[in-house]
Amino acid sequence: MKHTGSCLCGAVTFEIEGDFDRFFLCHCSRCRKDTGSAHAANLFSSTANLQWLSGEEKVKTFQLPGSRHSKSFCMECGSALPKSLMGGKLLVVPAGCLNTDVDMKPVAHIFMDSKANWDDHLEEVPKFDQLPNQS
C-alpha cells in the first residue's frame, strides 16, 4: 500500500509505503494537548517506510521531558506529521495528515480513563455538512 500526505500549508510532503498494523484513538491528556481535540487518531506500522518528498528540514520533533511522549510537526503551520520511534522500528502517522484514504477503521479507543469530560455521547450531537447558520 502507498500513501501520500502533507502538512496544512503544503511545505512538507511525504510518502509512506507499506501497511499499517494498528489504528488507535488516544484520549490521554498529552494527545489531547497535542491535537487540541478529544483524541489523537494515530496509525502505527512496524514495516512501512517513510520518505520525505519536500520540506524535511521544516519537520521538528518535540520530546516531552521525562516521558516517551513526542510529537512531530511542521514548523511553518504546526500540523502534526509522522514520526519514527524506537530507533526507527515503529512509524506513527497522524491519520489526519494523510491525503489518501485509509483502508482500516480504528481498532480501539485508548486511555479512556483520562478522556475529556465533554467527550461523551458525541454521536448524539447534531451533524452538518458545513458550518451551521449562526442566526
Image: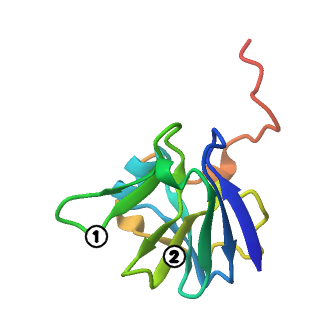
Q: Secondary structure at mark 1?
A: loop
* Mark 2 residue type: Leu
In which quadrant will I find the N terminus?
bottom right
Q: Where in the figure is residue 7, as x and y percent of width and height?
A: 61, 47
Q: Is residue 4 left or right of residue 46?
A: right
Q: Label 2: few (<14), some or many (≥20) within 10 Å?
A: many
Which quadrant of the structure image shows residue 132?
A: top right
* Mark 1 residue type: Arg
Q: Visible in this render: residue 115?
A: no
Q: Nearer the viewer, residue 51 or 105?
A: 51
Distance from label 1 to label 2 (Cα)? 14 Å
The extreme left residue here reads 66
Q: Residue at x 63, y 72 (%)?
A: 106
Q: Is residue 99 left or right of residue 40?
A: right
Residue topped by disc 2 = 91
Q: Where in the figure is residue 54, as x and y percent of width and height?
A: 63, 53
Q: Nearer the viewer, residue 88 or 54?
A: 54
Q: Visible in this render: residue 103?
A: yes
Q: Where in the figure is residue 30, as x and y percent of width and height?
A: 34, 56
Which quadrant of the structure image shows residue 48?
A: bottom right
Q: Where in the figure is residue 104, as x and y percent of width and height?
A: 73, 76
Q: Residue at x 61, y 43 (%)?
A: 11
Going from N to C along the chain, the mark reached first, 1 or 2, is 1
In which quadrant will I find the C terminus?
top right
Residue topped by disc 1 = 68
